Amino acid sequence: MEAIDNKNMAPAAKEEIREHGLTKSEFGVIWQSIRLKATDEYAVPPEILQVNGSTIGTLGNFSASTGKAKSKKTFNVSAIVAAALSNGEVLRYTAAFPEDKRKVLYIDTEQSKYHCQKVMKRILQLAGFPIDQDCPNLIFVALREQSPEQRRTIIDYMLYKMKGIGLVVIDGIRDLMYDINNPTESTEIINLLMQWSSQYNLHIHTVLHLNKGDDNTRGHIGTELNNKAETVLQVTKSQTDPNISEVKAMHIRDKEFEPFAFRINADSLPELVADYDFDKKDSKRLSLTELSEAEHKKALLKAFADCESQGYNQLLSSLIDAYASIGYSRGRNTIVALNKWLMTNGYIVKTDKKYSLAQGVYMEEQSKPDEEE
């Protein structure tokens, strides 16, 4: 940029500089850092965190983990930190930090020092380090007692003073602000994450809850995270086994990785669940609309197998047992609604207070060719 001559500058231009609070020299420094040139060379950001070959974290960027309460988010983050400390693989997380970026700064904003220490020892165990001595590459900070403004100031100062930090974990990001739904505050926090990660050439991983009623990240800060984060991981309780948590990419810039699952073992450590079936449906959560026509017919043929014409109470009992046999276990009230749906859609007909299976269902089933043994 050409030098700005105050003597020859028009009054309006001088006023513009004053209005924005910048002197000539201050703007000159900023200009050198923000202007992009075709002739400049920029290094590819080091890929320091991966899952199954997909990059979820690079130096100079930030990512997030999200999930509902009790989904084991902190256990998942512990695995990420342990992988970073060992520069190896934990669960499905593989770390490859440069030698001058091997330190991890873990910031907890919610838990007591006692519970923070439990998390720290869990990380050390997962990384293969002793739990009865400090690890020089893990700096753990508890900021529960500070205000949101104090937390931001402390983090900013630590990043300025500490050398060799490659990964920063902020658990949770919501406590750096006063109002989770304030657009201005949310933008400021995201800008801080982008500034810190870029200025100090490190990766920041944050933690944020999902809404209780849906799978959306909480508040305006959640929306901003989804828009700006390199990767957003979602940790979800398994629908088929409450002791298992599933991890998938909610948003990712790189190719999407195959989801994986983990459970907490007898040593209170997360361990991988091998051969976990992500497609298995939970009968308690299965909705009526998820049942195929073939599944309806299979259940109905079973319900009317012993009695072609049934009274109302007998019908409900038969439907309860028959639909349970295909994985749709429901109580009487739901089966009452199901019966109405079946009658509306022509599966069941009513004649003189008796219910029977529509002839079309029988005929279609009988017209099928015999299968080879």
Image (tube, helix red, strand yellow):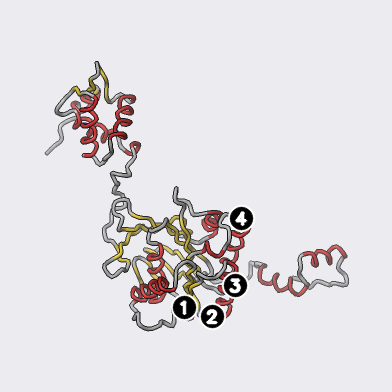
First-in-chain label (3 vs 4): 3
Q: Position of residue 220 (x, y in %)?
A: 56, 54
Mark 2 vs mark 1, CA separation in Å: 10 Å
Mark 3 vs mark 4, CA separation in Å: 20 Å
Mark 1 vs mark 3, CA separation in Å: 17 Å
- Element type at marker 4? helix
Q: Amino acid at mark 1?
A: Ile
First-in-chain label (2 vs 1): 1
Q: Position of residue 218 (x, y in %)?
A: 50, 54
CB atoms at circles 2 and 1 under 8 Å apart? yes
- Between 295 and 321, the one nearer to me in the picture: 321
Q: Amino acid at mark 3?
A: Thr
Nearest to the eye among marks 2 and 4: give it.
Answer: 4
Q: Is residue 83 above or below residue 362?
A: below
- Element type at marker 1? strand
Q: Amino acid at mark 2?
A: Met
Identify the disc placed on residue 153.
Answer: 3
Q: Quickly name the residue at label 2.
A: 162
First-in-chain label (2 vs 4): 2
Q: Quickly name the residue at label 4.
A: 183
- Between 312 and 349, the one nearer to me in the picture: 312
First-in-chain label (1 vs 3): 1
Q: Quadrant of residue 308?
A: top left
Judged from this view, the residue extending furthest toward the left is 373
Residue pictured at 58% horizontal, 76% vertical: 157
> Count of labels shown?
4
Q: Quickly name the residue at label 1.
A: 139
